[in-house]
Amino acid sequence: MAGRPQMSLDEIREQVQTCRKCQLCEGRTNVVFGVGNPSARVLIVGEAPGKNEDLQGEPFVGAAGKYLNDLLAIAGLSREDVFIANVLKCRPPSNRDPRPEEIEACADYLREQTRAIDPDFIVTLGNFATKFILKTDVGITRLRGTLQQAGRFKVFPIFHPAAALYDGKKREALENDFATLGELLGNRE
Ligand code: URA
Ligand code: SF4
C-alpha cells in the first residue's frame, strides 16, 4: 500500500473484513478491525484478539478489556476518546503468540490505520505492539513508561494489561504508567 493515497478508515475496514493474507483467516469468527474515535489523539495498540474479541468482533472486551477501561480512566480517558486496535486482526489459535509471517501479512492494515487516524500518541501494550511500532529489540520491561518517538508519533510503551491481571507488581507499573500518560496529555497534574 506504500505510495498509494491516504485511505479512509472505512476503506481500510472493507479490505480487512475479507482479508485472507495469512492462515489466521481460517479459524476466525470475526475480524477485529478496531474501534473508537477516528480522529483520536491517542491510538492504543494491543497484540491480537482473544476468544471474546473474536466472538464479538471488538478489541479488548474480555477481562483485559475491563481492566483497560479502568486504566484509561486513570489517564483521564474513556473508550470514546481513543482508538483501539491490535497488531493482528484475527485470533491466533489458543491465543498463541503471533508469528512473524502473520505480523508481516497484517502490517499494512495497522500502518494505514495509523495514517488515517494520525494520532499524537501511540500507546503500545506489551512486547509485540512495542516491537512493531518502534522496530526495536529492546524489551517492554526496559521501555515501559518511557516516552519514545517513531516518525511524527510520540510512542508510550506500557505492559500488556493481560500480563498484569494476576501480577500485582505489573499492575502497579501499569497504573503508574497510565497516570504518566494522563500527565503527558495534560489531563492530570
Ligand atoms: N489482548 C489484546 O492484545 N487485544 C485484544 O483485543 C484483547 C486482548
Ligand atoms: Fe488478514 Fe491480518 Fe487476519 Fe491475517 S490476521 S487474515 S493478515 S486480517
Image (spheres, rainbow, N blue to C red):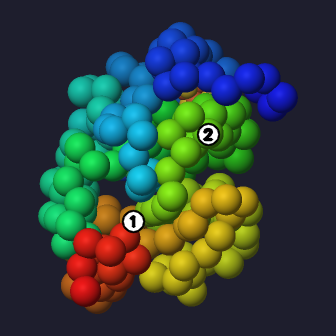
Where is mark 2, residue-wise?
Answer: 115
Residue 179, given in percent of the width and then of the height, sits at 28, 80
SS at badge 1: loop
Along the line of sight, the residue nearer the viewer: 189 or 85: 189
Say above or below: 131 vs 59.
below
Q: Which numbered marker is on residue 183? A: none
Q: How crowded is mark 2: few (under 14 residues within 10 Å), some or many (20 or more)?
A: some
Query: In this rendering, would 42 be left or right of 106?
Result: left
Query: Mark 1: is the Cβ under 8 angstroms from ligand 1?
Result: yes
Q: Position of residue 130 (x, y in %)?
A: 58, 64
Residue 180, image x, y percentages: 35, 82
Q: Is residue 2 visible?
A: yes
Residue for point 70% across, 47% down? 100
Front in this rendered view, residue 169 or 107: 107
Could you tell me which residue is drawn at 61 percent across and 60 percent down? 153
Q: In which quarter of the image is the C terminus?
A: bottom left
Q: Which amino acid does label 2 sit on?
A: Arg
Locate the N terminus by quadrant.
top right
Element assignment for label 2: helix
The mark nearer the N terminus, 2 or 1, is 2
Quadrant housing residue 4: top right
**How many numbered marks have been drawn onto this rendered protein structure?**
2
Q: In this view, does 68 lie above or below 119?
A: below
66 left or right, relative to 158? left
Q: Which residue is drawn at 47% across and 18% down?
A: 10
Q: Which residue in the protein does label 1 denote?
A: 160
Measuring 39% from the left and 46% from the top, which residue is drawn there?
40
> Where 189 falls versus 26 (above or below)?
below
Question: Amino acid under label 1?
Answer: His
